[in-house]
Image (cartoon, helix red, strand yellow):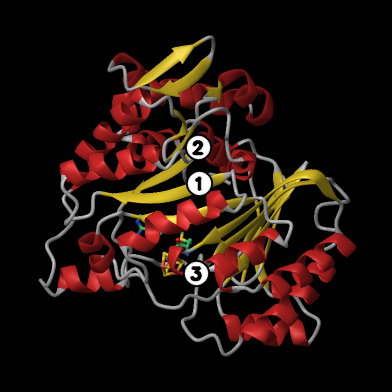
Amino acid sequence: MAGIYIHIPFCKQACHYCDFHFSTSLQNKDAFLSALKKEIILQKSYLKSELISTVYFGGGTPSLLSKKELNEIFDCLNDNFKISDEAEITLEANPDDLTIDKILGLKGTPVNRLSIGIQSFYDEDLELMNRAHNSGEAVNAVKLAQENGFDNITIDLIYGIPTLSHHHWRNNLQIAFALDVKHISAYCLTVEPKTALAHKIKKGQLKNIDEQHGSEQFEIMLEAMHKNDFIQYEISNFCKDGKFSKHNSSYWLKEKYLGLGPSAHSYNGESRQWNISNNALYIQSLEKGMLSFEKEELSIDQRYNEYVLTSLRTIWGLDLNYLEQNFGKKQLEYCLIEVGRYIQTEHVLNEENKLYLSDKGKLIADKITSDLFLVGEG
Ligand SMILES: C[S@@+](CC[C@H](N)C(=O)[O-])C[C@H]1O[C@@H](n2cnc3c(N)ncnc32)[C@H](O)[C@@H]1O
Ligand code: SF4
């Protein structure tokens, strides 16, 4: 089983916190779509005829594409890959795009899961982040999608926003529960270098983000999710009724995936590669029939680091037997020495030879994983 990720590198406007790859000029959209189809054909052997169980349109803003544009991409995918009849096919959608016409159009494509970027149900947060939608559109987008046959919906929320009080954060979660979505991804606002948010903080126009505020909202979220029967199956991902994201889970469970479009990453078990993060150069290269990516063969230690990074953040935990069998004794011993102090302080739990983060461990997940990393060895 393998996955395909397609990056749609266009947005209507730039959110102030975002450092994903996108352009706000849609001028190159048609040229991009032609280039993407060429890339699909050139990469048809990357996954060695494995059955594709997930396709994920991410961005950027994939909901900018029309039904016709999406169906042409699917035709090309089907001509070149074997996509399972039960494949999970997700499209990231921004609320301001989800009009009734757009939703009905999407029903006429193979997309069967929508990931709606809500971020907050409060206008002051949406304004601070420079989102293109308002709170009314956020609620309507979810309702319209549900009423028109999308039952597999996930929403993205952001917490730790300076304007978001604990009371409003609780309400954001309650609104999400009341909307009866079965999957929620919730991220703590991070200040990425070179974003408008970082610039405003540097200029003193905005207070720096308070880490404690984010940590408290993380704890509020865990309690609310638990009360509402949501399972935290990864630090930022929660679901109800077994509605795990097959696509996200495949990343964490180390399945192979092909990334298409500018800036997209691919992984085939041995190496990782990433496409050029520039729309014009991506298009030019494919017009000449060439792929444009950088590639890194992963050493055993790098693969060990990736395993630590991804597994420890999940409900499935870090399997010490798997670690020893796949990476070796040296790596196992290093991991056990480094994790010892976190087991003593109960940030990490060792159950039947598997390591899991406790709730207080989840608050410092980045610190714990980086302490377990092997550095400087090939
Ligand atoms: C890159 S966006 C793409 C989806 C879609 N364009 C949207 O905005 O809804 C994916 C998600 O990443 C999250 N995200 C991006 N940058 C972030 C940041 N600096 N801090 C927290 N969350 C972030 C947001 O929740 C966003 O919905
Ligand atoms: S968060 Fe989404 S809509 Fe906003 S700039 Fe990033 S990719 Fe575009």
> Which secondary structure lies at badge 1?
strand
Q: Which residue is mark 2?
A: 182
State the residue at coordinates (38%, 45%): 186
Q: Which residue is mark 1?
A: 154
The CA distance from mark 2 to mark 3 is 21 Å
Number of other residues with Cα within 10 Å of mark 3, as a class: few under 14, some 14 to 19, many 20 or more: many
Looking at the rendered structure, the kind of residue marked 3 is: Asp
> Which secondary structure lies at badge 2?
loop
Looking at the rendered structure, the kind of residue marked 1 is: Thr
Instruction: Determine whether label 1 and label 2 are within 8 Å by CB.
Output: yes
Looking at the rendered structure, the kind of residue marked 2 is: Lys
Instruction: Determine whether label 2 and label 3 are within 8 Å by CB.
Output: no
The CA distance from mark 1 to mark 2 is 7 Å
State the residue at coordinates (27%, 17%): 345
Relative to 158, does residue 133 appear above or below in the rendering? below
Number of other residues with Cα within 10 Å of mark 1, as a class: few under 14, some 14 to 19, many 20 or more: many
Could you tell me residue 340's position as x and y percent?
37, 18
300 to the left or right of 183: right
Q: Which residue is mark 3?
A: 97
User: Would you say the beta carbon of the disc 1 residue lies within 8 angstroms of ligand 1?
Assistant: no
